[in-house]
Amino acid sequence: MTVFPPAHHVNFAELQPAIALGALDGRYRPVVAELSNYFSEAGLNRARVFVEVEWLIYLLDHGVLPGAPQLSDSERSYLRSLTEEFDAEAIRELAATEAVTRHDVKAVEYFIKDRLDAAPTHIPDSVLPQLHEVVHIFCTSEDINNLSYALVIKAGVEKGWLPAARQLRDDLVTRAKENANIPMLCRTHGQPATPSTMGKELAVFAYRLSRQIKRIENIDFLGKINGATGTYAAHVTAIPTVDWQKVSRGFVESLGLTWNPLTTQIESHDWQAELYADIARYNRIAHNLATDAWTYISLDYFHQNLSAQGSTGSSTMPHKVNPIRFENAEANLEISTALLDTLAATLVTSRLQRDLTDSTTQRNIGTALGHSLLALDNLIRGLAGIDINAEAMARDLDANWEVLGEAVQQTMRAASIAGATGMDDPYERLKELTRGNRVTGEQMREFIAGLHLPADVEQRLLALTPETYTGIAATLIDHL
């Protein structure tokens, strides 16, 4: 029996650069790499440095700490450069410090204090070395973490995920308008049904996605900075003359976040759960789009543009062009949605005033959004790689004249109400003609002519074809 891996094999765990364990950091990294600015450990640490520095500056600039020195413009710029110039060396230094502290936020505190000590080499007579005790003052780790996560999630969603979500919606709007008047046979329960236009059907998805985008754009990103159990106990004990709620609110809002006045040690993460539920719902609508697009390809309503696809369809069947973009999107949306559902369900619970379940859970936010972003990229590429096959849709329509049965029986009902005679049992009469039967245009016109409808009504029905039986589908797109 042969054994895998072989007894003597290269240990990938020891290779440099490190081999990615997950697909997002390996095969698909070019698509999702932007998210590493926000959701990687390095991205989180950069946000922590930002919050710690801005808290220090805010306290000094607002005179919150009696006796503390004032900062010069050059000192303020130096402090902010710690975030602006946070690079590979800083990442390595923080990792080495955390290996000693075994505490991520404490490592950030020490990192900043080391930079305060080094300030005089850049700014003569700087007061920064005197500010050791201002770094992380009146903060529990979760004060820094909740604000850092709020900032990276806000930036990651607004700069990384939302542009792709909007582009997919916008591409659908463009396609909907281009194909507003292209008739197609609908299928309810997979069976031939009242026709629509391809544009209107794409517009439905655009409208659905637009609603979710609006919800996501209007999410409040909450933050707090109020101490170990959310009571400002240490704050008012140390400096009782300060309005600490005003300071807290002012600082949180200065970061572009919404202040949460009532928390335990942690900010409760309810806003995160709301956000992930909305993104998951967007994902599910996009998943519906992927499966419908796949089906339209199988019906030849969508014809795949070979040059746009640019890929081998099958390793053995050279004629094939597989709908891989839509299949890839479908799978990654399922993975993303499952993770988002888990995040939304677990982050709203924390035992008593604090437990650490959220610490490891939140480190999967980037993975959840990464799989969604990868899926959106595939959907955008997939839609760009298809042509609408109006000829195939026209053939399908002409082969299904029985779908006019709805129009005829409803017109008979209306005529009966208006006083026409001989309009009894319209549904049953059309059912007898059409159910389970393939009806030709000639048969349908013969049936209509035998109803003895008022002349104008009869002419309207005789002029109707499956291709023209689309109601006001083309104008419904105006709602976009």
Image: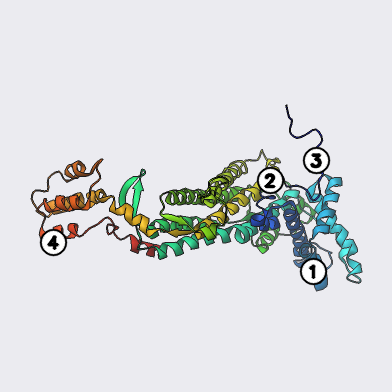
Across and down, in percent, residue 330 comes to 53, 47
Residue bearing mark 2: 22
Judge depth for marks 3 and 4 and give the one in front: 3
Q: Quadrant of the C terminus?
A: bottom left
SS at mark 3 in the image:
loop
Gap in Å between the C-alphas at discs 2 and 1?
Answer: 40 Å
Q: Among all residues in the image, which is located at the extreme top?
A: 1
Q: Residues within 10 Å of mark 4 (few under 14, many from 20)?
A: few
Mark 2 and mark 1 lie on one chain; the one further toward the N terminus is: 2
Gap in Å between the C-alphas at discs 3 and 2?
Answer: 17 Å
Mark 3 and mark 2 lie on one chain; the one further toward the N terminus is: 3
SS at mark 4 in the image:
helix
SS at mark 2 in the image:
loop
Viewer-closest of 315 and 461: 315
Residue drawn at the location 91% of the way across and 72% of the way down: 124
Q: Residues within 10 Å of mark 2 (few under 14, many from 20)?
A: few
What amino acid is at disc 3? Asn
Residue bearing mark 3: 11
Mark 1 and mark 4 lie on one chain; the one further toward the N terminus is: 1
Gap in Å between the C-alphas at discs 3 and 1?
Answer: 48 Å
Across and down, in percent, residue 54 comes to 75, 62
Mark 3 and mark 4 lie on one chain; the one further toward the N terminus is: 3
State yes or no: discs 3 and 1 in contact (Cβ < 8 Å). Answer: no
Judge depth for marks 2 and 1 and give the one in front: 2
Residue 179, above or below 313: below
Across and down, in percent, residue 72 comes to 82, 72
Q: Quadrant of residue 1?
A: top right
Q: Quadrant of residue 8?
A: top right
Tell me the tag on residue 456. Answer: 4
